[in-house]
Image (cartoon, rainbow, N blue to C red):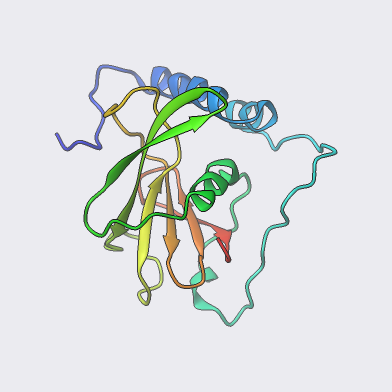
Amino acid sequence: MRCHETSPRFSTQERESMLAQRAARWLTPLAAAALITGAAPAASSAPTRPAPSAPASESWTRGFPMCSNPPTAIARWWKRNGWVRNGDVNKQYRMDEGGRVAFIWGGKTYKNVSTPRLPSYGTYNEYDVHPSSRPNAPRDSHRLVRRLRGGNLYYTADHYRSFCYIGAGW
C-alpha cells in the first residue's frame, strides 16, 4: 500500500464524515457548511473573490469545467505561504492558524501522467486540500494542482481522475 492510499478500515460514508468534520474545524463556518451539505454557500456581506476568467485562446482552460465550489480557503493559505516547490519530494508543513495546529502536504512536482491530462506545456505542483490534526496521518484524494507560470489552478476531488479549473493568477 502506498503512503497516499487509505486503509479499508473505514467505509466510504465514515471517511466522508471524517473529512467533513476536519474541514469544519479549519474552514469558516459558511465554507464548512457548504462543503458538508454540498450546497453553494449563501450570499454574505463579506467581499468575495470573483472567479478569474481566461481568454478562450488559452488552451489550459479547454475541456475543464469551472469549479462550482472550489476550495479557495486552502488555496489562499498556500498562496500566503508562497506556493512551496520541492521537486520530487513531498513535504509536510505545520499550519498554525488561530491557536490550532495542523499538518498538510504539498509542493511535489505533478508528473501529469494521469487521464485526463492537463495541458502538456508547463510545470505543475500538487498540494493537499484537507489538513490533518496529527503529523503523517493518511492523506485523502483531494488535491490542488498549480501551473507554475501564470498560476493556473486546478482541483481534483478524486485523485486526478477528473479536474475542474479554478482560475489563473494563483
Q: Is residue 116 visible?
A: no
Residue drawn at (35%, 74%) of the image: 120
Position of 117 with respect to 6 (left or right) is right
Judge from the rendering whether residue 99 lies leftward or rightward of residue 137; answer left or right: right
User: Residue 15, image x and y in percent?
Assistant: 39, 22
Q: Residue at position x 26%, y 62% from top? A: 113
Q: Percent from the top left, x then y, of residue 142? A: 42, 41
User: Which residue lies at the image location 51% right of the left edge and 71% below the top edge?
Assistant: 150
Report the side of 114 relative to 43 (left or right): left
The answer to whether residue 16 is above or below residue 88 is: above
* Residue lying at the far left of the rendered structure: 1
Q: In this view, does 79 lie above or below 135?
A: below
Q: Residue at x 39, y 27 (%)?
A: 132
**Of residues 17 and 143, the one drawn nearer to the viewer in this rendering:** 143
* Viewer-proximal residue among 130 and 18: 130
Viewer can see residue 20: yes
Q: Is residue 164 left or right of residue 33?
A: left
**Toward which corner of the image does residue 91 lie, by quadrant?**
top left
Depicted 32 relative to depicted 122: above or below: above
Q: Position of residue 88 (x, y in %)?
A: 22, 57
Foreground of the two, 101 or 42:
101
Residue lying furthest right: 45
Q: Where is residue 139 in the image (x, y as percent from the top left)?
A: 32, 33
